[in-house]
């Protein structure tokens, strides 16, 4: 993985929105270690730079979904701007920047022998605020201007997986957001497409 190339693409996409606060977001993300963080501890893109790669993948998928859906539903052109698609998809997982900590695990290799394996463990102690909601709050703290649609698309990007089904308020807020703002479905779909299609690894398929 070429970390610098991914970082450059991330920054170019974000700056293309010309949104107030993007330079401050880039600075804060750099300082927090976003560009070297993995996207997971043991699943897809669990390597340095994985989080930036996943963010760029989600953004590419979101732009493709948005372009494709506009041909089927022309009203979408007016309802959702390119800048909103980029902001919400590229920044949906900034909450993951500080949760993966380097660790060495013992695991069995293919021959059944135990060996040390470098990896990551998860810790939420920096700012235990949740997932999508943590991304929104961090971005507001970084000084990014966001629309309601963008904030809600980031907040609910996990779709039904992120909804507490014991909470009537959660269920209704998710449902209402999705009905009011098409961006919510675009980002949620793009996140899923990035992880399940663009980030498939041979190793994961071997384990099936
Ligand atoms: Fe996420
Ligand atoms: Fe994601």
Image (spheres, rainbow, N blue to C red):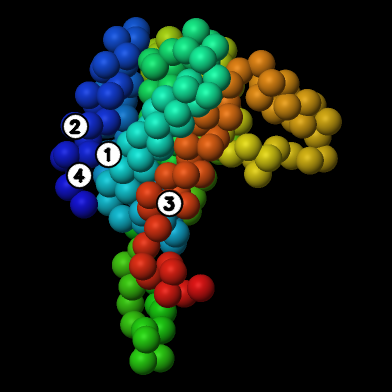
Of circles 3 and 4, which is in front?
3
**Cβ–Cβ below 8 Å for labels 1 and 4?**
yes
Task: Report the residue marked by disc 3.
Answer: 197
**Cβ–Cβ below 8 Å for labels 2 and 4?**
no
Give the secondary structure at mark 3.
Answer: helix
The earlier-in-sequence mark between 1 and 4 is 4
Res. 3 mark: 4
Task: For residue 5, say whether it is visible.
Answer: yes
The earlier-in-sequence mark between 3 and 4 is 4
Whole-number angstrom distance, CA of label 3 to CA of label 4: 21 Å
Disc 3 crowd rating (10 Å Cα; few below 14, some 14-19, many 20+) is few
The earlier-in-sequence mark between 3 and 1 is 1
Res. 8 mark: 2
Whole-number angstrom distance, CA of label 1 to CA of label 2: 10 Å
**Cβ–Cβ below 8 Å for labels 3 and 1?**
no
Of circles 3 and 1, which is in front?
3
The earlier-in-sequence mark between 3 and 2 is 2
Examine the rendered structure and indicate whether residue 206 appears above or below residue 38.
below
- Say left or right for 162 vs 106: right
Q: Quadrant of residue 37?
A: top left
Q: In the image, is the residue at mark 2 within 8 Å of ligand 2 by its beta carbon?
A: no
Of circles 1 and 4, which is in front?
4
Query: What residue is at 38 percent from the left and 53 percent from the top?
Result: 199
Whole-number angstrom distance, CA of label 2 to CA of label 4: 9 Å
The earlier-in-sequence mark between 2 and 4 is 4
Res. 35 mark: 1
Examine the rendered structure and indicate whether residue 68 appears above or below residue 197.
above
**Cβ–Cβ below 8 Å for labels 3 and 4?**
no
């Amino acid at each position: 993985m070429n970390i610098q190339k991914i970082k450059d693409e991330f920054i170019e996409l974000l700056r293309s929105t010309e949104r107030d606060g993007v330079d401050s977001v880039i600075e804060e993300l750099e300082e927090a270690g976003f560009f070297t963080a993995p996207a997971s501890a043991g699943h897809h893109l669990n390597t340095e730079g994985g989080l930036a790669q996943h963010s760029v993948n989600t953004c590419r998928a979101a732009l493709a979904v948005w372009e494709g859906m506009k041909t089927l539903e022309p009203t979408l052109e007016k309802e959702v701007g390119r800048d909103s698609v980029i902001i919400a998809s590229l920044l949906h997982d900034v909450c993951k920047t500080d949760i993966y900590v380097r660790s060495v695990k013992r695991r069995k290799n293919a021959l059944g022998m135990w060996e040390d394996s470098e990896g990551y463990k998860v810790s939420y102690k920096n700012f235990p605020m949740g997932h999508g909601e943590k991304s929104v709050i961090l971005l507001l703290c970084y000084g990014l201007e966001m629309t309601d649609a963008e904030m809600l698309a980031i907040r609910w990007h996990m779709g039904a997986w992120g909804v507490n089904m014991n909470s009537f308020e959660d269920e209704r807020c998710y449902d209402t957001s999705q009905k009011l703002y098409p961006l919510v479905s675009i980002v949620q779909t793009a996140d899923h497409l990035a992880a399940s299609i663009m980030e498939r690894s041979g190793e994961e398929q071997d384990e099936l």
